[in-house]
Amino acid sequence: MKPNCTKEQLSDVIQMIKSAGLKADVSSGEYQTVIGIIGDEKRIDFEKIKLMGGVYDALRIQVPYRLISRSYIPKDVVVRVRDVPIGKDNPPVYMCGPCSVESYEQLYRIARQIKAVGAHILRGGAYKPRTSVHSFQGLGLEGLKHLKSVGKDLDMPTITEVRSEFDVKTVAKYADVLQIGARNMFNQDLIEEAAKTGKPILFKRSFAAQIDEYLSFGERIVASKNRNLILCERGIMPLGGSFKTQTRFTLDLNAVPVLRKETPFPVITDPSHGTGRRDLVLPMSRGAIATGAHGLMVEVHDRPQEALSDAAQAISPAQLGKIIRVCDLLYKTISESESPFSSDVVDGNGQQPKS
Ligand code: PEP
Ligand code: MN
């Protein structure tokens, strides 16, 4: 709609959409209102809509993830986790902590140290996705309780993974952000149940998902009326079954600017799972911020030799401090430069795409 369209003009258009048997999803921005038409496009005449009063333009969005596409929401979305803003041009947000919550004491010790070096959000797994049934499976409810108490005692928002749709309500009672892990990116029931809580969702890309598939599943969160979507690139499988790499996964840093171009939602990266190696967490963190990530998820342990999961990728709180210093500096330098993290990526002919 045009920026100055009237309420009557808006409701006329909505009425026209509804009378064609389609759904109208109204998104009111600071300057403009956008109406998403959901359903079979053949039921509506776009040329007629264009002629209606107050209409700025009508266009077909071809991508399967239209509700989270930039053509639908042109401006960057900021997701707030308590008082921490994530996305747009806000400084990088650091979500850090151990892979697994092991005890109140372990989590408190680590949380205190990472808060001191600048971490914003405390992470810790309670329901762990593990390949082997013989590995540590996480403390479950007890872990959630520790996470909530440590978060409260140190005044830090918290994030933890929810693995099953049956645990959503419980996890939502204890954590500020619900994480949907790489293994569950395709789990529709879990995604929808988690979205319904209205809480921010950290939605990780599966190691076997193309970006279109990833965004199509992310679309379900917004289609379930939850706009608090945070995307996370956490590493993909190397191409070709027998192609051996020296890392656990391949952190796909191409995905960062691609996701930022495709969607206005915040994008963070996870260099810990993306590499599986503590010596690579710093360089890949720098890479993530340099390519436009809005934040990082980093696994930290003060006694990696005692860690019950993912010890090889755990960095120390001091190393995290260094990462935060370097990444903040990098962010500052790039955002002060001529063209900071623009999502208007120049196209192949050197042309700025039309807005
Ligand atoms: C995690 O963050 O602890 C985790 C299991 O991540 P992913 O789903 O990316 O493997
Ligand atoms: Mn882990």
Image: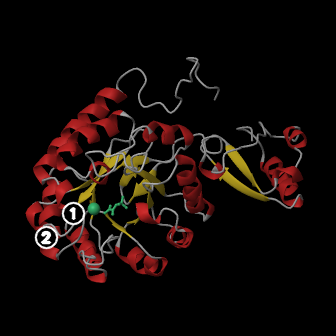
Look at the numbered disc 1 and give the secondary structure of its residue.
loop
Amino acid type at circle 2 is Gln
Whether label 1 lies within 8 Å of ligand 2 gets the answer no
Q: Give above or below for 278 relative to 333.
A: below
Left or right of residue 246: residue 30: right
Residue drawn 34% across the image and 25% down it: 336
Q: Secondary structure at mark 2?
A: helix
Question: In this rendering, does residue 303 appear at all?
Answer: no
Q: Is residue 250 left or right of residue 215?
A: left
Q: Specify how the rendered protein is coloured.
A: secondary structure
For the point 58% across and 17% down, which residue is it? 349
- Image location (x, y in percent) of residue 247: 27, 47
Q: Label 2: which residue? A: 106
Q: Amino acid at mark 1?
A: Pro
Q: Quadrant of ligand 2?
A: bottom left
Disc 1 packing (10 Å; few <14; some 14–19; many ≥20) = many
Q: Nearer the viewer, residue 34 or 96?
A: 96
Taking the spot 36% from the left edge, 29% from the top edge, the residue there is: 335
Q: Nearer the viewer, residue 132 or 305?
A: 132
Task: Read off the residue under disc 1.
Answer: 98
For residue 90, which numbered disc appears in the image?
Answer: none
Q: Do residues under tags 2 and 1 come within 8 Å of each other at their CB atoms?
A: yes
Q: CA distance from mark 2 to mark 1?
A: 9 Å
